[in-house]
Image: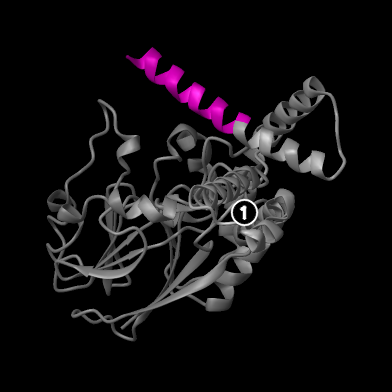
C-alpha cells in the first residue's frame, strides 16, 4: 500500500513538473529562445533540483506559475467550449509571458515577507490583575538559519529592546533540523543581549527535538530559563507555566498534565501558559489559566496552507477567548523549509496585559 502511495505521489509530481516545463518551454519558444529538447529538459531538471537543494525562496515561483498556467488553460478551454473568442484575455496572457512575470514578482514579494518581520501588538485585560500591568514579548518559530541568520539577529534584539518588555517568552521551534552550530551560538548570544525585568523563558517545540542536547547549555549561558513542564512564580505577581512539546516525549519523559503543573499554584494570581502547539485547548484553557500563548502554525506560511491550517488547529492565528482563557497564536518570527511567506507576515508579538 505504501509503495503504491509513493508511486502515485511521485507520478503526480512528475506530471505537474512536466506540465509546467512544457508551458515554460512554449513561452521561451514564443520569445525566440529555442533549444534542443534534451538540453531544455536537462537544464529544467537541474535548475529545479538546485533551487530545492539550496532551499531558495524561488521555489515558490514554480507554484505560482503552475497555478497561473492552470487558470489560463481553464479560461481558454471554457472560451473554446462556448465559442468565445477571448481576444482581450489572449492579449493579457501575452503568449504566457505575463504569467512568468507575475509569478516572478509575486515570488520576490513573498520572499520579502520572510525577511521583514513586523511587531504584532495585543492588549489583553485579565480578570485577575497584575499590579502595574505587564508588557510581554512572545517569540516563536524562529527556525534559526532559514530566514533568521546572524545578520538578522541584531534586528531581532533591537526590536525586542525597543519594546522594553517586562518579560520575554520563547514559544518553541527556535531551532530546527537545519540549524547549524553557528546558528545556535549566534541566536543564544542574541538572547543574551535582550533586556527585560523578569528575564527570558523558553519551552521546546516539535522541531527543536533533534538538537535539544546541543543548545540547552547555550541557552542557559545566555540566561534563558527552560520551563518544559515547569511552573515559576514570577515577581510574586503571576505564574509562568511551560508545557513540554509532545515531540520531546519518550519512555522516560512523559508530558505532565495541566492539573499536575498547577497542583501547588495559588490561582488567585494570573497564570500564563506556554504550549507550542495550539492543539490542546481542552487541557490548556479554563482551569484557572488566564492567558495561553502558542506558535507552531506559521499561519500556513505558504499558500494554500493558510487556507487549510485552521482545520488542524483549535486556533490557527490571532487572539480569541476559549473557556474564559485568552489565547494568542503567533505566525512566528521565522519560516521553516524555504524563506517564503504568503498570506501572512513574520512577526514578533508584543502583549500589554492589564
In the rendered structure, does residue 140 fall within the stretch colored magenta? no
Residue at the spot 52% in from the left edge and 77% down from the top edge: 164
Viewport quadrant of the C terminus: bottom left
Magenta stretch bounds: 1-18
Residue 30, horizontal then vertical, whole percent: 80, 43
Q: How many marks?
A: 1
- Here the colouring is one colour
Residue at the spot 52% in from the left edge and 44% down from the top edge: 175
Q: Which residue is identified by label 1? A: 189
As displayed, is residue 131 above or below residue 305? Answer: below
Instruction: Please tell me which residue lies in front, 29 or 85.
Output: 85
Q: Looking at the rendering, which quadrant does residue 197 occupy?
A: bottom left
Residue at the spot 53% in from the left edge and 29% down from the top edge: 13
Viewport quadrant of the N terminus: top left
Predominant SS of the magenta segment: helix
Residue 265, horizontal then vertical, whole percent: 16, 62
Q: Can residue 187 be spotted in the picture?
A: yes
Instruction: Please tell me which residue lies in front, 84 or 59.
Output: 84
Q: Going by the image, does 292 lie left or right of 23?
A: left
Instruction: Please tell me which residue lies in front, 276 or 270.
Output: 276
Amino acid at each position: 500500500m505504501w509503495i503504491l502511495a509513493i508511486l502515485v505521489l511521485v507520478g503526480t509530481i512528475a506530471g505537474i513538473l512536466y506540465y509546467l516545463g512544457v508551458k515554460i518551454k512554449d513561452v521561451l519558444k514564443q520569445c525566440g529562445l529555442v533549444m534542443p529538447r534534451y538540453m531544455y529538459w536537462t537544464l529544467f531538471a537541474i535548475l529545479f533540483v538546485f533551487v530545492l537543494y539550496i532551499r531558495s525562496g524561488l521555489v515558490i515561483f514554480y507554484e505560482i506559475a503552475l497555478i497561473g498556467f492552470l487558470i489560463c488553460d481553464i479560461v481558454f478551454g471554457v472560451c473554446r467550449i462556448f465559442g468565445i473568442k477571448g481576444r482581450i484575455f489572449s492579449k493579457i496572457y501575452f503568449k504566457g509571458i505575463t504569467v512568468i512575470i507575475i509569478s516572478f514578482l509575486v515570488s520576490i514579494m513573498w520572499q520579502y515577507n520572510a525577511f521583514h518581520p513586523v511587531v504584532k501588538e495585543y492588549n489583553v485585560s485579565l480578570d485577575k490583575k497584575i499590579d502595574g500591568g505587564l508588557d510581554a514579548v512572545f517569540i516563536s518559530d524562529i527556525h534559526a538559519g532559514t530566514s533568521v541568520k546572524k545578520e538578522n539577529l541584531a534586528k531581532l534584539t533591537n526590536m525586542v529592546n525597543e519594546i522594553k518588555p517586562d518579560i520575554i517568552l520563547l514559544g518553541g521551534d527556535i531551532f530546527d533540523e537545519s540549524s547549524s552550530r553557528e546558528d545556535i551560538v549566534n541566536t543564544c548570544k542574541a538572547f543574551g543581549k535582550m533586556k527585560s525585568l523578569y528575564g527570558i523563558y523558553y519551552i521546546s517545540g516539535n522541531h527543536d527535538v533533534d538538537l535539544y542536547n546541543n543548545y540547552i547549555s547555550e541557552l542557559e549561558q545566555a540566561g534563558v530559563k527552560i520551563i518544559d513542564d515547569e511552573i515559576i512564580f514570577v515577581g510574586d505577581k503571576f505564574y509562568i507555566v511551560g508545557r513540554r512539546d509532545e515531540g520531546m516525549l519518550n519512555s522516560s519523559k512523559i508530558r505532565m498534565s495541566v492539573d499536575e503543573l498547577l497542583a501547588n499554584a495559588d490561582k488567585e494570581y494570573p497564570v500564563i501558559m506556554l504550549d507550542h502547539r495550539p492543539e490542546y485547548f481542552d487541557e490548556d484553557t479554563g482551569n484557572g489559566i488566564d492567558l495561553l500563548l502558542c506558535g507552531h502554525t506559521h499561519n500556513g506560511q505558504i499558500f494554500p496552507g493558510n487556507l487549510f491550517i485552521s482545520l488542524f488547529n483549535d486556533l490557527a492565528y490571532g487572539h480569541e477567548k476559549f473557556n474564559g482563557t485568552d489565547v494568542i497564536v503567533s505566525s512566528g518570527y521565522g519560516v521553516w523549509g524555504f524563506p517564503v511567506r504568503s498570506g501572512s507576515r513574520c512577526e514578533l508579538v508584543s502583549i500589554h496585559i492589564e
